[in-house]
Image (tube, grey):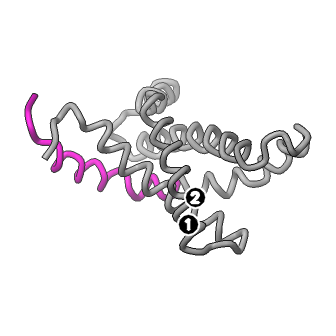
Amino acid sequence: MCKKSSFPVIFNVFLAFFITLTVTIFMLAVQNTLTPLNLLVNMIYGFCLNMVLETLIDLPGFGNLFLKLFHLKFESVLGYFVRTFFIVVLLVVLMSVILMFCEFGYMLPPAVFLATWITKVPAIFLVAYITALIVIAPSMKVTAALCTKEG
């Protein structure tokens, strides 16, 4: 279907879609504003931001730094959890700050912005981390099956 060289981009589509979907549903449900229209609108800009971040940042390399730091093997179960943990931390911090700034901008004083943001991050992280742990392995397999062309 697609070239093997497209593997990272295709994989990022899957990861961005599932993380954005679960976090968006969670946040809208918590705010009691979960409607099809709100889900669609929030998914569009959340997915776009997630794709940009996943494409521009070397997330696997970032996760591998922590594997080296903690002397863990890539193939180990603990390595999978640790690598995914730090990748998701980076994504959640960047996405939540950017999206919250887009929503509130300069309307909130910096201290209020930070206080509001910090209260939301742990729950968002937990949802994103669990989602990533569940979808990374199947997404890798599906991406590998789709990206079979040489060249």
Q: Which residue is mark 2?
A: 42
| Residue 23 location (% of width, % of height) | 57, 59
What's the amino acid at mark 2?
Answer: Asn
Residue 71 can be seen in this image: no
**Residue 71 left/right relative to 113:** left
Residue 148 lies, with reference to residue 40, above or below; the image says: above
Name the mark on residue 39: 1
Q: Is residue 97 magenta?
A: no
Q: Residue at x 50, y 54 (%)?
A: 44
In front of the other: 148 or 137: 148
In the image: residue 128, left or right of residue 117: left
In the rendered view of the protein, which quadrant contains the C terminus? top left
Q: Are marks 2 and 1 in contact (CB under 8 Å)?
A: yes
* Residue 50 appears anywhere in the view: yes
Question: Where on the picture, by quarter, is residue 41?
Answer: bottom right
Three-letter residue code for mark 1: Leu
Q: Position of residue 135 (x, y in %)?
A: 38, 56
Q: Residue at x 41, y 49 (%)?
A: 15
Q: Which residues are magenta?
A: 129-151
Q: Position of residue 138 (x, y in %)?
A: 29, 56
Considering the numbered disc 2 on the image, is that residue within a helix, a strand or a loop?
A: helix
Q: What residue is drawn where x is 86% and y is 45%?
A: 107
Mark 1 element type: helix
